[in-house]
Image (cartoon, rainbow, N blue to C red):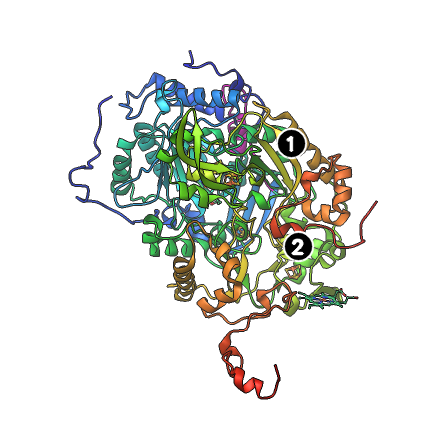
């Protein structure tokens, strides 16, 4: 018999998509039965009370969670988010229900051994509920009490060789696409770079010193599978500089119909015979490819690396060999002044361990942002406030046409004093010699 | 319940303390076939919805079975996932950015046996535990945020609307009939933990009432200057307020200036703004993050408000379904939802999707608004 009746939530158990309600119920039942005889360290009925408080939200159509108070582990400013229920008498099992962010491994690959260790820990010391994964990328443990925090951290670090992730005004847990691990489009090793920078900047990750949150995300190519361009203060997107490699035989196999376009992604409908003119050449945004004597020709200098042709004919076309990444900066969600997309700062940089060139860009930006950024001002907002030219100045990067979609519309050009011959200080007396009042 | 110590000593917190070790190294978790072929992949092919193969220049093949799931999952569920991965995948698996689970195997036969096993598993309530799909020109898992399960600022739930929407879109999770892939995302408030502002279809929780003020407690609970500074539209100012016969240091809100962002509430819990009737959902469409063909773009608001219809949000899901179907029937191959809308023009988009156009859809927020008005006589009737 369930502890709380949940007639509204129960309606979310039907339908084909996996039901989180059914899943929580199975956890609630497992805790109630406690077949393994676990000495649960937070209330046994946490899951049941969570269902109860959710049901109440479904009635009120409002959340019943309060502000996170300040909780955390000793010496860290991030990784734990405090959470308290605003109906603790009705739902004591979730009165204190903090979140723990655990830094996920690159590419989100796991062994079952490790996952089970996480499960054992979280069953004993938490609610048994997780997010796999949170929007930022971390493994998210939902629901524990304050006395458990240090114990969980101790176990993670001592037994699982595993650290917390980031929260608060610091570097958030960096995350990456699967990249070279299983993607033929990857222009660099996203996992290696993500890991290296995560390790390099552990201090920034755990001890908030920034004006606000800061996010790194790593995409192996312009397809942007982790949406780095839209949701990270610095996005690292793989690109190549030289020619797209062409296998003419495979091109013919696509034309002839032996190979399915777009790796079979359109198999759910009959789109008719593959038409390379219509589906590839005409859709190329720069119109830099054509057929000549039965062969596909690409004017690579004009290609803008949009990925379309490669996506359509993955067996015929491959990214070039001169590979690296582009850095875009300042993306953020709409709050406060509207959404911002990442802006291109570095069109191309080689990705070579120990990544010194990349770190230099990062650290120059941080120095500026920490000096000039207002409390709760994201990098993108600072760039807007002080201007892209200021960003170029602090990073020592030369302006180039790649930095703009088009040159400025207005001629209200701010010249600096040192840029104008003779400076700005002039002598009015000298002027008046030649101009009457 | 007896307190179990794992070894941490609160009297000597620094003793044996291990910090700043970061995540486990990714290579520990690579399946052997991945480790051996990393960086050598030649091409991939989708064999059927949810099943694909990657072929390496070494000749090795890795078969992946992709499974959708609720991102909120319990340890019991994760253990079941582990059991499956042990049985078919040598104890390895991975998750995708959009909260799918991927099981990797080295043979086609194993992949199909795995698929059959996965699709046979159901929750007691009747839903699939591990539906296979979400590849190619279809709809994959909805990335989403915490909602009423765990956050303090949501204007709608996350897991509930996502479950209801995926039930409605399930056929397109299992099929690849769309002109291009279509990404649906949900954020339960304007903070948008995630990139819903750049999704083909975005479900966004939104408040419509300015904050209340808990005058009695405000000064005690909050730093008034922080609350004042938090407001992006300068709607809040410090004020002495008469409340039930007493004078308090509190704040006043110029209500017509409020755009309901909830920043003040984040800084000051004495300014709650959630409301049964005020809160609901905004639908946005046409965003994308990929650079393919056209550049990355923001989503645009096409429905300014839908109430929170618990527990299954029928208006929201029906509207989404309609947009998906009209897009599927009309767009060209490879054309993303936003590219299609731009090609036919937004006036036509609203007509075809049978969505009413209201004054709320004309931007009136600061500078960016201007760039969304029409500055040409090139329009359609
Ligand atoms: C003492 C100050 C100014 C005077 C006496 C003045 C006078 C004029 C006159 C007589 C015209 C021509 C109107 C026509 O087409 O018949 C004009 C046009 C214009 N003025 Fe001014 N103006 C002044 C300041 C400014 C300023 C400060 C700006 C911009 C910041 C400005 C922007 C323009 C523009 C853009 C036009 C052209 C509009 C068009 O033809 O599209 N003016 N002004
Ligand atoms: C006290 C205030 C806040 C709390 C407690 C909070 C809580 C959270 C939580 C729990 C997540 C992770 C959600 C998940 O993993 O699904 C998150 C992520 C995020 N939050 Fe907040 N949030 C707060 C304020 C804000 C504000 C003011 C903004 C924007 C101005 C914001 C933007 C985001 C974004 C963009 C993400 C993650 C996006 C990503 O990495 O993909 N949050 N926040
Ligand atoms: S972003 Fe590019 S490299 Fe990374 S997984 Fe996506 S397609 Fe592959
Ligand atoms: S990548 Fe894009 S721009 Fe370059 S040739 Fe292919 S379709 Fe054209
Ligand atoms: S989107 Fe808003 S309500 Fe939802 S989890 Fe993020 S901060 Fe909380
Ligand atoms: S909700 Fe936002 S706009 Fe409204 S008063 Fe609060 S901070 Fe200001």
Judged from the image, the secondary structure of the residue bearing numbered disc 1 is helix
Relative placement, left or right, of A326 versus B325 is left
Q: Which residues are magenta?
A: B113-135
Q: Tell me if I can see residue B87 in this picture.
A: no
Q: Which residue is mark 1?
A: B171
Instruction: Give the farthest residue toward the right.
Output: B381
Q: Tell me how far mark 2 sits from mark 1, CA to CA.
A: 27 Å
Residue B69, image x, y percentages: 51, 33
Residue B120 magenta-highlighted: yes
Which residue: 48% across, 20% down?
A55
Residues packed near mark 2 inside 10 Å, few (<14), some (14 to 19) or many (20 plus): some
The chain letter under disc 2 is: B
Q: Which residue is mark 2?
A: B294
Q: Nearer the viewer, residue B129 or A43?
A: A43
Is the N terminus of chain A in the top left, top right, bottom left or bottom right quadrant? top left
Residue A354, image x, y percentages: 37, 63
Q: Nearer the viewer, residue B89 or A319?
A: A319
Residue A307 magenta-highlighted: no
Which residue: 29% across, 44% down?
A161
Where residue A9 is drawn, which disc sits there? Answer: none
Secondary structure mostly seen in the magenta stretch? loop
Relative placement, left or right, of A425 versus B223 is right
The chain letter under disc 1 is: B
Asked if residue A97 is positioned above or below residue B366 in the image, the reply reads above
Residue B4, image x, y percentages: 22, 28
Q: Tell me if I can see residue A114 in this picture.
A: yes
Task: Pick whichever of labels 2 and 1 is earlier in the sequence.
Answer: 1
Judged from the image, the secondary structure of the residue bearing numbered disc 2 is loop
Q: Nearer the viewer, mark 2 or mark 1?
A: 2
Is the C terminus of chain A in the top left, top right, bottom left or bottom right quadrant? bottom right
């Amino acid at each position: 018999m369930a502890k709380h009746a949940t007639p509204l939530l129960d309606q979310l158990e039907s339908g084909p998509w996996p039901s989180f309600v059914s899943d929580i119920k199975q956890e609630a039942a497992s805790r109630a039965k406690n077949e393994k005889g676990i000495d649960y360290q937070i209330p046994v009925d946490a899951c049941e009370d969570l269902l109860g408080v959710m049901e109440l939200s479904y009635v009120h159509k409002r959340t019943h969670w309060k502000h996170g108070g300040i909780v955390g582990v000793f010496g860290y400013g991030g990784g734990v988010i405090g959470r308290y229920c605003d109906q603790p008498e009705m739902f004591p099992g979730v009165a204190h229900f903090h979140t723990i962010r655990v830094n996920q491994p690159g590419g989100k690959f796991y062994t079952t051994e490790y996952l089970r260790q996480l499960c054992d820990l979280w069953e004993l010391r938490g609610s048994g509920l997780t997010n796999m994964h949170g929007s930022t990328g971390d493994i998210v443990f939902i629901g524990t009490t304050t006395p458990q925090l240090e114990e969980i951290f101790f176990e993670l670090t001592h037994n699982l060789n595993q650290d917390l992730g980031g929260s608060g005004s610091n570097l958030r847990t960096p995350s990456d696409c699967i990249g070279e691990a299983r993607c033929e489009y990857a222009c660099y090793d996203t996992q290696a770079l993500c890991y290296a920078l995560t390790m390099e900047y552990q201090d920034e990750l755990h001890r908030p010193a920034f004006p606000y949150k800061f996010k790194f995300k790593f995409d192996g190519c312009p397809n942007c599978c982790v949406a780095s361009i839209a949701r990270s203060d610095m996005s690292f997107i793989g690109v190549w500089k030289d020619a797209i490699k062409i296998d003419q035989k495979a091109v013919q196999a696509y034309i002839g119909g032996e190979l399915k376009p777009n790796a079979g992604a359109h198999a759910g409908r009959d789109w008719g015979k593959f038409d390379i003119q219509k589906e590839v050449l005409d859709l190329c945004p720069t119109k830099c490819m054509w057929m000549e004597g039965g062969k596909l020709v690409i004017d690579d200098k004009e290609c803008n690396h949009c990925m379309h042709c490669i996506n359509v004919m993955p067996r015929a076309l491959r990214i070039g060999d001169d590979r690296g990444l582009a850095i875009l900066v300042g993306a953020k969600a709409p709050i406060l002044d509207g959404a911002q997309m990442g802006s291109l700062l570095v069109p191309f940089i080689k990705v070579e361990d120990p990544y010194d060139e990349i770190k230099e860009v990062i650290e120059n930006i941080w120095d500026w942002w920490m000096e000039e950024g207002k409390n709760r001002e994201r990098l993108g907002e600072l760039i807007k406030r002080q201007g892209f030219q200021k960003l170029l100045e602090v990073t020592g990067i030369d302006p180039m046409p790649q930095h703009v979609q088009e040159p400025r519309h207005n001629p209200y050009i701010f010249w600096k004093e040192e840029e104008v011959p003779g400076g700005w200080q002039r002598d009015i007396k000298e002027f008046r010699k030649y101009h009457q009042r | 319940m007896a307190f179990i110590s794992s070894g941490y000593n609160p009297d000597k917190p620094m003793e044996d303390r291990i910090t700043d070790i970061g995540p486990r190294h990714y290579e520990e978790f690579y399946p052997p076939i991945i480790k051996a072929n990393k960086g050598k992949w030649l091409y991939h092919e989708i064999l059927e919805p949810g099943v694909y193969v990657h072929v390496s220049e070494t000749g090795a093949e890795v078969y992946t079975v992709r499974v959708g799931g609720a991102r909120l999952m319990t340890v019991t569920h994760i253990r079941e996932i582990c059991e499956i991965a042990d049985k078919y995948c040598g104890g390895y698996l991975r998750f995708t950015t959009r909260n799918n689970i991927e099981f990797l195997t080295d043979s086609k036969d194993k992949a199909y046996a795995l698929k059959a096993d996965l699709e046979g598993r159901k929750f007691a309530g009747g839903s699939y535990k591990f539906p296979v799909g979400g590849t190619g020109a279809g709809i994959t898992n909805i990335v989403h945020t915490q909602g009423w399960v765990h956050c303090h600022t949501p204007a709608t739930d996350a897991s509930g609307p996502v479950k209801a929407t995926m039930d409605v879109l399930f056929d397109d999770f299992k099929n690849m009939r769309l002109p291009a892939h279509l990404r649906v995302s949900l954020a339960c408030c304007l903070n948008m933990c995630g990139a819903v502002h750049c999704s083909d279809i975005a479900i966004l929780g939104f408040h419509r009432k300015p904050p209340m003020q808990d005058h009695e407690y405000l000064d005690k609970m909050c730093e008034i200057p922080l609350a004042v500074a938090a407001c992006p539209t300068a709607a809040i100012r410090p004020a002495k307020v008469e409340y039930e016969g007493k004078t308090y240091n509190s704040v006043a809100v110029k209500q017509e200036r409020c755009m309901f962002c909830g920043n003040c509430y984040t800084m000051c819990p004495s300014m709650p703004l959630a409301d049964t009737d005020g809160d609901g959902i905004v639908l946005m469409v046409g965003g994308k993050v990929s650079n393919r063909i056209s550049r990355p773009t923001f989503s645009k608001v096409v429905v300014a408000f839908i109430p929170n219809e618990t527990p299954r949000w029928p208006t929201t899901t029906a509207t989404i379904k309609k947009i998906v179907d009209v897009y599927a029937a009309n767009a060209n191959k490879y054309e993303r939802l936003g590219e299609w809308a731009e090609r036919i023009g937004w006036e036509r988009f609203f007509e075809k999707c049978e969505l009413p156009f209201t004054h709320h859809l004309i931007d009136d927020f600061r500078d960016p608004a201007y760039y969304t008005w029409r500055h040409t006589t090139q329009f359609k009737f």
